[in-house]
Image (cartoon, rainbow, N blue to C red):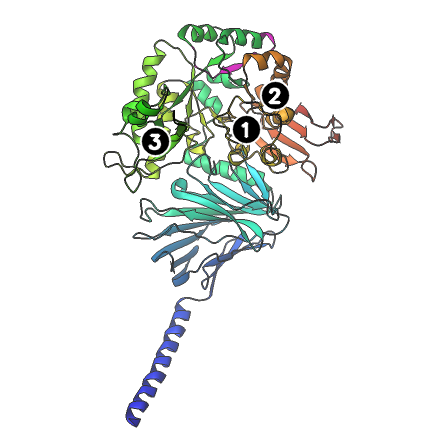
Amino acid sequence: MMLIGRNRAGCKRAGVLLIGLFLCCWCRAVPQKITVGNAKISVTLNTAEATLSVTDKRTGQTWRQKASGQSKVTQSAKTDNGIEITWRSPALDTDIKTSLRLDADKPELTISLSARGKPKWALGFPHPFVTDSGTYLVVPMNEGISYPVDDQTIKPKWLVAYGGHGICMAFWGVTDGERGHMGIIETPDDALIHIQRVDGKLCVAPKWERQKGNFGYTRKLRYVFFDKGGHVAMCKRYRSYVKDKGLLKTLAQKRKENPNVHLLIGAVNVWCWERDALGIVREMKSAGIDRILWSNREGAEVIKAMNEMDGVLTSRYDIYQDLMDPKVVKGQLRHVHPDWTQGGWPEDIMLDGKGDWRKGWRVKGKDGQMYPCGVLCDKQALKYARQRVPEELKTHAYRCRFIDTTTASPWRECYHPDHPMTRSDSRHWKMELLRYMSEDMKLVTGSETGHDAAVPFVHYFEGMLSLGPYRIPDAGRNMREIWDEVPERIAKFQVGHKYRLGLWELVYHDCVVAQWYWGDYNNKLPSIWDKRDLFNILYGTPPMFMFNRKFWNENKDRFAQSYKNVCTVVREVGYAEMTDHRFLTPDRDVQQTKFANGAAVAVNFGDKPYRLPNGQKVKPMGYYVWEKK
């Protein structure tokens, strides 16, 4: 027995020795910290948590990540211009290979992630950089918004990078107004961002969705660090990035391909369902509203007559997403939308991973219940456009077409065996639909809400100015209802000049015309009509009107004034890049934009007059426009 005891004790001591040797070797194989750098930044990886700290050598500021989940680095190696690591997250049950690369002479760091197999969940990595009091998030949600990191009224949220109701450009940032950093998502088709709180302050972390259950292709993220320039510098860096990717196609270039694009510049988008469309258009022109995008479908003779008027761009609504189960149509619906692709049921509808058909727009039935449409597979949509549009144009000579939902709805996976799609495939076919409209059909083309994947193929977006989460309740259904009372979220965020940023304009103003949403137009809430006009003036974007005959008759002069104030500016800067946006007062009440053609705009959202450096006084809720001499 004593011999057995001694053997057990010896084995225990040997085991401890082996564990110690293993840990010693592991520590030598995976050092606690690895540092690489270039002339602008120094990057340190903490292998214990797989977190990064980045020091900007120009300012001495260090940005530090904080682990938001457990992960263990199992291998690491320093290379000439970066670090190679392999790490594992218990929650994912997958080894993730990560490559960190520094640009040779820029303050930029790229991260590539690859893995095999089927992770259990989406991958959240890298960890978020913590933020400091006094800084704000830069988020390209529709037109753009800033979130002060200390603002406790901002709720955490997820925003997809693969659809208009998320981030419409594949980046985010943090800045104090000068210094900061941004993340550019170079593989956005299956990516999203998580706005969350760390140590009580807002920050952002990327997350990578699986591709049909697999990790799939290599995911890429680029961090850029700034010593000055704030959100403007971020937008200009992103503009350079998308130019290299071929997404930057200007309205001037598009006008060469289709001269009717010029009719869009400085045109008010009008949604009106009155029968006397020609009469209203004539009255508008008599009131000085001389450039009009008439968006409602009309008869062939009306379209012909409008086309013969100077300054009128004829358009109509169209959609290639929704179709309804014929059984529901027969049993519950009083009518079928004329643009539903009913011929696609059930062969061309989209199926999810469980084999169920994806649900779309809901319609109230005769029994009061809401019935969902199916979603047409994006891969199948183009054939319906080819059947519909050329035939219609033979009799109805529209010059423009608005394609609903295409850029608003997310890229979706389809599991139908006859037309399967990844999200990347979905994006491709959505863009092919828009390309067909603009290039093959030679139509000025718009889509809903907006996403920069479509910039080469469209001319305008309805909804870009209207931040999705802060629109009027049920804006997509009760479009024509005029509201007297302004909901809190509209006043605070939708027209909240202390939060909003013109990020889209800083990147794409000269490429795509941005408009309000058709349930959130300039005259929707008359008490904030003036403020909406000021945003249009500041950003150089046209207004949107929606009205019936009665409202038009009662407000002709107000409509004309809105058009004159806004569209005079838009006509001046419509083809120009926005080069700068800044706050002229600490409270953000007075803001200024500049454009590449030398024009500049100052807007005073406050209640006190403001004197510009040139001596010009800008009155409360007023504006001033000048040109560089």
Q: Answer with mark 3 or mark 2, whichever residue precedes in sequence.
A: 3
- Disc 1 to disc 2, C-alpha distance: 17 Å
Whether residues under marks 3 and 1 lie with C-beta atoms below 8 angstroms apart, the answer is no
Tell me the quarter of the picture where residue 47 sits.
bottom left
- Asked if residue 158 is among those painted magenta in the image, a careful observer would answer no
Amino acid type of the residue tagged 3 in the rendering: Val
Amino acid type of the residue tagged 1 in the rendering: Glu
Q: Answer with mark 1 or mark 2, whichever residue precedes in sequence.
A: 2
Vertical position of residue 459 compared to residue 135: above or below: above
Magenta highlight range:
286-298
- Residue at position x 50%, y 7% from top? 278
- Disc 3 to disc 1, C-alpha distance: 37 Å
Vertical position of residue 526 compared to residue 584: above or below: above
- Residue at position x 33%, y 44% from top? 211
Residue 566 image position (x, y, % from top left): 61, 21
Query: Which is more foreground, mark 1 or mark 2?
Result: 2
Label 1: which secondary element = loop
- Asked if residue 292 is among those painted magenta in the image, a careful observer would answer yes
Name the residue tied to disc 2: 566
Query: Which is more foreground, mark 3 or mark 2?
Result: 3
Label 2: which secondary element = helix
Give the number of the disc on residue 391: none
Q: Which of 467 and 435 is in front in this view?
A: 467
- Disc 3 to disc 2, C-alpha distance: 38 Å
Give the number of the disc on residue 375: 3
Give the number of the disc on residue 577: 1
Label 3: which secondary element = strand
- Residue at position x 39%, y 54% from top? 98
Residue 377 image position (x, y, % from top left): 31, 31
